[in-house]
Image: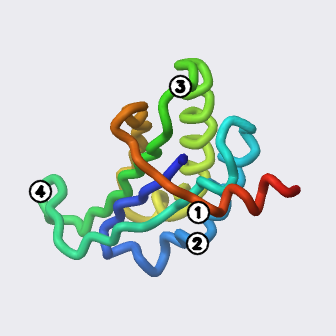
């Protein structure tokens, strides 16, 4: 963990530049020092069918979720969320100036017991 999801309306696919967003998000999360780099993942979920508001203005949205493992303090989660959202707002600023766009971010802490995973990528980074 953490896993970053961006649910995006398909009408901004060409302009959203998600590879750049994900590169920045991954680096930001790694730089916090509270997440193991081998567990950081970002992904897009493109929505080809949606309804927003009255549906009249070709609206767009990006709802992002950061799922993290349990055990970090509320203060550290807030700091990560605030820093991440500043980065996200900056990333989408130019697009928001050109069109109607809603962006949102939620942080979800996963249950410490009901969370199963296996990852051999961590070993690669533990050698550094």
* C-alpha span from label 4 to label 2: 30 Å
Mark 1 vs mark 4, foreground winner is: 1
The answer to which of marks 3 and 2 sits earlier in the sequence is 2
The answer to which of marks 4 and 2 sits earlier in the sequence is 2
Tag of residue 82: none
Residue displayed at 18% across by 57% down:
52
- Where in the figure is residue 28, as x and y percent of width and height? 69, 48
In this orientation, which residue lies closer to the viewer: 35 or 43?
A: 35
The answer to which of marks 4 and 3 sits earlier in the sequence is 4
The answer to which of marks 1 and 4 sits earlier in the sequence is 1
Residue occupying the far left of the picture: 54
Tag of residue 71: 3
Tag of residue 54: 4
* C-alpha span from label 3 to label 2: 29 Å
Q: Is 36 placed above or below 41 here?
A: above
- Where in the figure is residue 45, as x and y percent of width and height? 35, 67
Mark 3: give few (<14), some (14-19) or many (20+) Cα within 10 Å: few
**Secondary structure of residue under mark 1:** helix
- Where in the figure is residue 12, as x and y percent of width and height? 39, 73
Mark 4 vs mark 3, foreground winner is: 3
Mark 4: give few (<14), some (14-19) or many (20+) Cα within 10 Å: few
**Secondary structure of residue under mark 4:** loop
In this orientation, which residue lies closer to the viewer: 34 or 27?
A: 34
* C-alpha span from label 3 to label 1: 24 Å
Labels 1 & 4 near each other (Cβ < 8 A): no
In this orientation, which residue lies closer to the viewer: 4 or 11?
A: 4
């Amino acid at each position: 963990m953490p896993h970053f999801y961006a649910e995006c309306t398909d009408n901004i696919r060409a302009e959203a530049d998600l590879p750049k967003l994900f590169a920045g998000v991954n680096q930001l999360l790694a730089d916090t020092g509270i997440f193991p780099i081998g567990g950081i993942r970002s992904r897009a979920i493109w929505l080809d069918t949606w309804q927003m508001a009255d549906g009249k203005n070709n609206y767009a949205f990006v709802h992002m979720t950061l799922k993290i493992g349990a055990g970090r303090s509320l203060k550290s989660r807030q700091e990560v969320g605030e820093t991440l959202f500043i980065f996200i707002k900056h990333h989408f600023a130019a697009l928001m100036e050109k069109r109607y766009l809603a962006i949102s971010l939620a942080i979800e802490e996963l249950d410490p017991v009901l969370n199963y995973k296996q990852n051999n990528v961590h070993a690669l980074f533990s050698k550094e």
